[in-house]
Each structure stands twice: as structure tokens, then as C-alpha cells.
Image: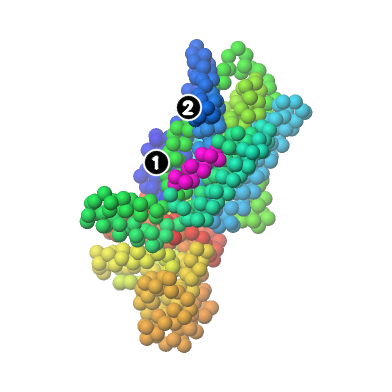
Amino acid sequence: MSWGAWRGRSKGERVALVAQVSQPLRRYLGTEAAGAALLLAATVLALAWANSPWSWAYQGLLTTPVAMTVGGDGLDMDLHHWVNEGLMTVFFFVVGLEVRRELALGELTDRRRVLVPAVAGLAGLLVPAALYLAVNGGGGDAAAGWGVVIGTDTAFLLGALAVVGPRLSTQLRLFLLTMSVADDILAVTVIGVAYSDALHVPSLVVAVACLGVLVALGRAGVWQASPYVAVVLVLWLSTLRSGLHASIAGMLSGLLVPALAARRDLVEDAARAAKAFRQSPLPSVGRTAQRGIVRAVSVNERLQEVLHPWTSYVVVPLFALANAGVDLRDGVLADALRSPVTWGVVLGLVVGKLVGISVGTFGAVRLGLGRLPQGVGPGQVVGGAALSGIGFTVSLLIAELAFGESELRDQATVGILLAAVLATALGWLVFRLAARFRGERTAELPRVLAHPVDPERDHIHGDPDAPLTVVEYLDFECPFCAKVTGVAQALRAHFGDDLRYVVRHLPLPDVHPHAELAAHAAEAAGRQGRFFEMSALLFGNQDRLELEHLVGYATELDLDVDAFLADLADDETAARVREDVAGAEASGARGTPTFFLGGERHVGAYDAASLIARLEELRAGAPATRPAPAPEPEPVNVPNAGNAAPRQS
């Protein structure tokens, strides 16, 4: 997204766009979208330069030899190949890091959310390739370009979506990003297998050994980044010498760098070390504090934090500058527009991606493999499929690998650029039609509390008729929910009788195996009027939530233990928790803790100061900035940790 487009959103819309997803994914989306404008500028510069009187300088720059030698051995390539086989390896390494993180901690942890976009990604590869070969499959060199149409440029896709897509498109972005994961993995596999030279076996053995070392480092719990970087560098060099394209080394190595949730003990150790440094600002104490803070963040996320801006703002624009510069003079453009290679690329990217992704998505849903993301309509899926025809980065790379420096490469490049324009225009048209005829104007999670507060049912701290309402969806095994208990106390202390604080359940059993039982225990205690007392014990003993522990807490609270056990196993207790979970799903809550202030889901920081500030606005009558609520979907019983609130450990 360009800065101008971002500024064009209202403040509330900008917050809503980024605050519904986990922080690492917010950084990813924001950086990719912002980098799209720079990528476009580099493309225009390359075309202008290659068709100017100074085109000789452009070609001369790309063919400048650069050698790196140590002890008489090293690499000697021109700048063009350093960009394509060196810098682009960093790009694919970052892609691999992001995929690993999403598989371990993010959107891809729920395999039910993966199947539909994965099938869509596979279909979005097969159909374009088939259409290209239908035009150029008669044999000859042109047939080698089938891989040009298989890739989607994520940066351009997200940038175009920000400009021509729905006003709020967070959920659609996540769907397309998940689909691009499958697309990237398949595309890099194709590059590594179909577009590599004859293999040099000794170098290939070294590369495989490097992959084994990366696995061993992860299993050994090595948290320093330098060992991983050293092994990846050796892997890259050996892959280059083996005859495989270096992009596959980048993707595979990124996939093998572990992504781990923040451990509570490491976070607490880092906090204590930082406090010690504040009290004693000595170099040795500072090094200890720095080491503790670094160790608390996984090496995967630390490498992403460092490399992602470089890939988005430097690597990919340089790649566009080095590969998009086609000299269209002297009849080259006219020849390209008459070439089956050009139109095969256009047909594959523009039509093939639209048909393949759409059919793959709706077919997977029809077969029961999953469902569309909440808030995303069928017309928006088709619009996103149309925008996926922007191949660019991977397409230009494969065109260079398939055709070398021949005229066919120039023709394929013209097709890639033409397809990017046509795919953007087609996406714009589809989104406009979906908004007008199907009412699909936004593609985000609901933000309004689906089930209003019921004093006869809900667990309420404070006056049930208080003018201000806070609803918290929580998980008793979530460490962040335990920390938030102090925030709740601060809110009640600040607002007094003007605030009612409502607690509802959102256990996340996929990451917290004891959460459902703990929720049932709180409800069972609530039958005897001790809900909040039991809640405090559960939060204070999050590592002791087995049945025997819960019985001990009931005894400590002087409950009727027999009645407590009966209520704990009662179907009505379980139904009560499921009702809260269904309400959370219908309200757009995907993680814990999630807050609703005045009936609207709070996005952003949830410290006491931020919540107090927003509640003061509500008390003063400040209007809430929000889109129209999305239609309430069919609720599910057990949502996974997702993107409405910070992820739990």
C-alpha cells in the first residue's frame, strides 16, 4: 500500500486494518503493502531506462562482473546474477521464515484453515500452466516457459488489494496470504526441480548436510542467530555449486529455523534483568539484560525483524530494476504483441489464476474441506483470484531461467507486465460488482458484540446497570489473561460504580489443553456463588489445572465438593461454555484476552491506560469508528488462537 493510500484511510480504519491480526503478521502485511509502491517505481524506472538513450548504461550495469574470492576460490558473477541468485535467496529465506512461523504459531496452526487456500493455490498453479501449454505446447523453446505463469507476487497482490479491494479487507488478506504460502512453496519447488542445471553431487551432499545441521540446531534449542546464519551461508554456496537454483536453499533453510512462542519463564527472566540494569546501569548487567531479552524472542522472529524491511525495500525493488527493463524499441513490442509466448503468459496469469483459484476454493468448500474465512464473500474470493494474476517477481525470475537472454524472455516479460495491468483492472471490476450486487463491501471480522450482556446470565463485577461495560473473553490457562487481571482491577478502581466488568469464556484447547476443564470448574463454582473466587485461584495456579487440583480449590473455597463435581460434569455447564465460545466466534474474537468496550471489539493495546482512555471517550459520548457489522456466521464450538488479539503462549 502506498503511503498516500494509507493516509487516505481514516484513523479508525487504519487501526482496524492492522489490529485484527497477530503482531508478526501485522508487520508482514504492513511491510509488503508499503513495499509494493517502491516495487512499482523500480519497474517503471527499469522500463524507462532500458528504452532511453542511456540504455547502454543499464545493460552495462547489469553485466558488470563482481567476484568474491578467498584463497583463490570464490564466486564470479555479473550483477544481474548476484541479484537473481544472491539477493533473491534472502527474499525466499524470509518467505520460508514466515511460513515456518505461521505453521508453528500463526494462521496455519489450524489445519482446517489451511486446506481451502492450499487447494486454491495448487489449482492456481495447474490451470495457468495448462492454459499456457495450450497456446505454446507444440514443442520448441516456448514450451519451457510454462513455469512463468505459476507464481503470484505477494507484495504487488497486497498493494493492489489495498487500492482496488474492499474498504476493510483484513480477512481476505489473510486468506490470500495463506494461499500464497502454498503458491510460494510450489513455485520454488518448480524452480529447483525444473529450472536447475546438471547436478554436482558432492556439492549437493554438502547442501543436504547443511539442512541436517539446521534441524539439529533447532532441536538442540540453539537460540543465537549466528549459527543459523553461518549454516545458511554455507548452504547457499553449496546449492549454487550443486546446479540447483539458490532460491530453493533460501526457502528450505527458512522453513527449518524454529519459531517458538514466548516462554513465560524467559520473559520473566528478561524483565528481572532489565529491572536490575535500571537499578545498576553497569556494562556487565546491561549485557545480561540484553542477552535475556534477545533469548525471550525466537530466532525466527528476530531474523524476520531484521531482514524483512531489507527484502521489501531493497531486494525486491532491485530485482525489479534488474529484470523488468525490456528494450521495446526497434519492433520488439510489436513482435511481442504477436507472440504466442506473450499471450500464453497473459492467458495463464489473468484467466488461469482467476479460474484456478476460484474453482479450487469453491470446490474445496463444496467437498467439506473447510469454509471461507469469516467475513469474506464469494465475490471477494473471485476478486482476490483475479489480483493473483500479478505474477511479477517469481514470473520474471522463471522467465530468465527458462529463456535466458533470448527474445522469448523479452516477450514473456511483456506478457508479465501486461498481465499485471489487466489482472489489477479485472480485480477492480470484480470487487465493484461484488459490492454492488452482493453487498460485499468489507472483508473483516465482525466487531460488534453478538450476544448483549444479560445480567441474569453473565458473570458481572460491579453494578449490573452501570453505564459503562467491559466484556472480556478469557482462557484460564492463557498467561496473558492472568496478567490482565490487574488491568481489570485498575478499571474498576478508576470508574467505580460507573463500570460493569463482564467475564466470558473462550478456552483454546488446541494450545491450552486444560482450558475447557478450568472453564467448567469456574462455572461449577459459580453455581455456588464463587465464580470470581475460583477464577482467581485458576489464574494463580495455571500450571496446576488437573481434576485433583480443581477439587482442592473447591475445598479451599469451602464449596460443597459433591455438588461441585456433579456440576463440573453437567451437560448444562459444558453448554454454557460452548455458548460463550459461539458468541466469541460470532463477535470476531479469535484469541485471548479479547475485550469489548461498549459493545464493540477493542483493537490495539489492552493495557489499563489504553482501555481507560477509550472508556472515557465512551463516557463522554465520543462515537465509535467502525464499519457496518458483518453478517453473523454459523458459530463453531472451538476456535483456535487467531488474529483478533495477541497470541497466547
Q: Vertical placement of 332 versus 26: above or below?
A: above
* Residue 162 seen: no
Image quarter where the N terminus lies is top left
Q: Tell me which segment is drawn in magenta.
A: 225-236
Tell me which residue sits at (48%, 42%) in the image.
230
SS at mark 2 in the image: helix
Residue nearer the viewer, 634 or 145: 145
Which quarter of the picture shows residue 307?
Answer: top left
State the image coordinates of residue 269 (x, y, percent, origin top left). 34, 60
Left or right side of 176 for 491 = left
Question: Magenta segment, principal secondary structure?
Answer: helix
- The residue tagged 2 is 42
- Report crowding for label 2: few under 14, some 14 to 19, many 20 or more residues within 10 A (C-alpha): many
SS at mark 1 in the image: loop
Residue nearer the viewer, 442 or 169: 169
Colouring mode (rainbow / by chain / secondary structure / one colour): rainbow
State the image coordinates of residue 119 (x, y, percent, origin top left). 64, 49
Q: Vertical placement of 611 versus 417: above or below?
A: below
Residue nearer the viewer, 231 or 173: 231
Cα–Cα span, label 2 and label 1: 25 Å
- The residue tagged 1 is 9
State the image coordinates of residue 189 (x, y, percent, origin top left). 63, 41
> Is disc 2 in contact with disc 1, using a CB cutoff of under 8 Å?
no
- The kind of residue on which mark 2 rests is Ala
Q: Earlier in the sequence, mark 2 or mark 1?
A: 1
Residue furthest to the right: 138
